Amino acid sequence: MSAVPVFDPVIHAPGRLQICAILSGLDEAEFALIRDRIGVSDSVLSKHLKQLEEAGYVKLTKAPFDGRQRTWLSLTGAGRKAFAAHVAELQRLAAMTAPEPMGQGFAG
């Protein structure tokens, strides 16, 4: 039995969706990389990460790097599963919006 696609409101917020999408292709990423890729401030990214971490979707690890303390982010197994299910649900919803046949447009 395959998993039922699930629309996940924790993941769906644009910033969190972008974070999950980036992390889904990586083992881990440094905080600044994610911040710069999605174009938000440190505080906005921290708020998104807190929600993802509380849901059990993201793991934060602090470690020294180049003489400074850095925060590394990774999707947990539950996060990868939830993101995949969310994407599957978005694809299912998108498939329901079939284009109208030519000449069948709505005449208001």
Image (cartoon, rainbow, N blue to C red):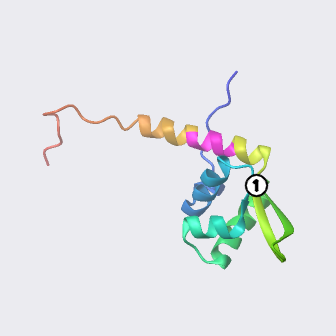
Give the left or right position of residue 24, taking residue 104 as reference: right
Give the residue displayed 86% in from the left and 67% down from the top.
63
Asked if residue 30 is among those painted magenta in the image, a careful observer would answer no
Residue 60 is situated, as x and y percent measured from the top left of the image, at 81, 62
In which image quadrant can residue 3 be found? top right
Which secondary structure class fits the magenta region best?
A: helix
Name the residue that disc number 1 marks. Answer: 74
Give the residue displayed 84% in from the left and 77% down from the top.
67
Judge the density around disc 1: few (<14), some (14-19), many (≥20) Cα neighbours within 10 Å.
many
Q: Nearer the viewer, residue 43 or 66?
A: 66
Q: Is label 1 in a helix, a strand or a loop?
A: strand
62 shown above or below 20: below
Residue 35 is situated, as x and y percent measured from the top left of the image, at 62, 69
Asked if residue 84 is among those painted magenta in the image, a careful observer would answer yes
The residue range painted magenta reads: 82-87
32 shown above or below 95: below
In which image quadrant can residue 41 be found? bottom right
Residue 21 is situated, as x and y percent measured from the top left of the image, at 60, 51
Q: Nearer the viewer, residue 37 or 49?
A: 37
Residue 54 is situated, as x and y percent measured from the top left of the image, at 79, 61
Quadrant, the N terminus: top right
